[in-house]
Amino acid sequence: MGKKEFSKIRRHLGKTQNRLAQLLGVSLKAMQSFEQGWRKIPVYIERQVLFLLAMKKSAPKKVKACW
């Protein structure tokens, strides 16, 4: 996963760098480094981000009550 794709996914999730860093258990500085390309994105971070993306896509839409 490249830095542009990582940033695009974060924005699609609607998370700030700080909030996504908290969710992933990394520092804000690490998150900034991933997005700037200064630090390689570890595989476990990629996996967690893709999991969050999949969960967002599969989240049920609001359903109207039948009554």
Image: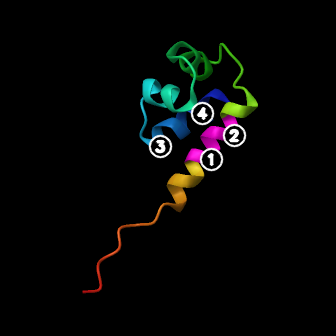
* Residue at the spot of label 4: 6
Cα distance between the residues tagged 4 and 3: 11 Å
Please determine whether, in this image, residue 13 is positioned above or below residue 63.
above
Q: Amino acid at mark 4?
A: Phe
How far across and down, in percent of the image, does residue 58 sit? 54, 61
Q: Assess whether mark 1 and mark 4 are in contact (beta carbons under 8 angstroms).
A: no
Residue 2 at x, y = what percent? 68, 30
Disc 2 marks which residue? 47
Which numbered mark, 4 or 1, is in the foreground of this view?
1
Residue located farthest toward the right when viewing the structure as drawn: 43
Question: Looking at the rendering, which quadrant does residue 25 occupy?
Answer: top right
Q: Mark 2 to mark 1: distance in Å?
A: 6 Å
x and y, in percent, of residue 30 in the image: 58, 16
**Mark 3 vs mark 2: which is more N-terminal?**
3
Task: Give the mark nearest the N terminus, 3 or 1.
Answer: 3
- Label 2 sits on a secondary structure element that is helix
Quadrant of the rendered structure where residue 7 is? Answer: top right
Residue for point 68% across, 15% down: 39
Instruction: Please report whichever mark, 2 or 4, sits nearer to the chain's N-terminal start.
Output: 4
Which one is closest to the eye, mark 4 or mark 3? 3
Q: Tell me the crowding category of disc 1: few under 14, some 14 to 19, or many 20 or more residues within 10 angstroms, Cα based.
A: few
Q: Residue furthest bottom?
A: 67
Asked if 5 appears above or below 30 in the picture, the reply is: below
Which region is colored magenta? 46-52
